[in-house]
Every structure is written in structure tokens, then in C-alpha cells.
Image: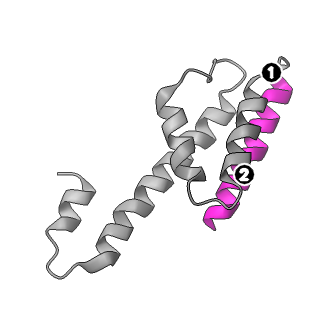
Amino acid sequence: MDRKGQLANVAFGGAWSEQIAGNEAVEQAMRLVEAAAKEGAGRDLRRDGSLRAALGLVTKTHPKGAMMVAAWDKALSMHDPGQRVAELIRIAKLLRENLGQ
């Protein structure tokens, strides 16, 4: 049973139990974004659907979410692998800071 299913069985769980599952999903998505940023030199990340979904989840509540997605896409198009990875890592750090972790 997944975490969401476990928390659904909590008597009088209220909104906090749903929030825990949501927070865990965002954290998992953030870890995926961070890992992908480090792999950006050796792998084409532009067509990775799970990464795109994770980026969408992480930027959903960011005050400049659309700008962060645009910056990520621009970084993915950089030809120099070193610059590409450095920019992706920089963006991932900004996203992590917004999560307050």
C-alpha cells in the first residue's frame, strides 16, 4: 500500500494527512529534478516525460514557476555540456530554496 493509501486509513486524519502525501510527492519530484540536473551532460533530458511531470509539480507553487520552467528549457538547449549542467544545477537549487529545505 502506498503512503497515500496508508494515510487515508487514519481516523480523523483531516487535511494534514493529505498534506503529508502531497509534501512527499513534491520532495520526490524535487529529488528527481536535482538528479537529472547532474546528469544533464550525458543524457538528453528534453524528452523525459517523468522529469517534465516532476518539474511541473515542483514549480506549481513557485511564485515564478513559469519562468523557472522556461529557464530550465533554455538551459536544456545549451550546447556546452558543462554550462548546461551548471545552469540546471543552479535552477534546481533555486527550486529547492523555494521549498524551504
Do the residues bearing badges 1 and 2 touch, measured as CB atoms within 8 Å?
no
Residue 82: x %, y % from top left? 83, 25
Relative vertical location of residue 85 with respect to residue 6 in this rendering, above or below: above
Q: Quarter of the image holding residue 8?
A: bottom left
Which SS type dominates the magenta stretch? helix
Find numbered disc 2 in the image and state the secondary structure of the residue it sits on.
helix
Q: Quarter of the image holding residue 83?
A: top right
The amino acid sitting under disc 1 is: Pro
Question: Distance between the Cα atoms at labels 1 and 2?
Answer: 18 Å
Residue 88: x %, y % from top left? 74, 37
Q: Going 74% across and 41% down the picture, which residue do you hit? A: 89
Q: Quadrant of the C terminus?
A: bottom right
Residue pointed to by mark 2: 93
Q: How packed is label 2: few (under 14 Cα within 10 Å), some, or many (20 or more)?
A: some
Residue pointed to by mark 1: 81
Q: Going 14% across and 79% down the picture, which residue do you hit? A: 11
Read off the magenta span. 82-101
Residue 25: x %, y % from top left? 42, 53
Res 9 visible: yes
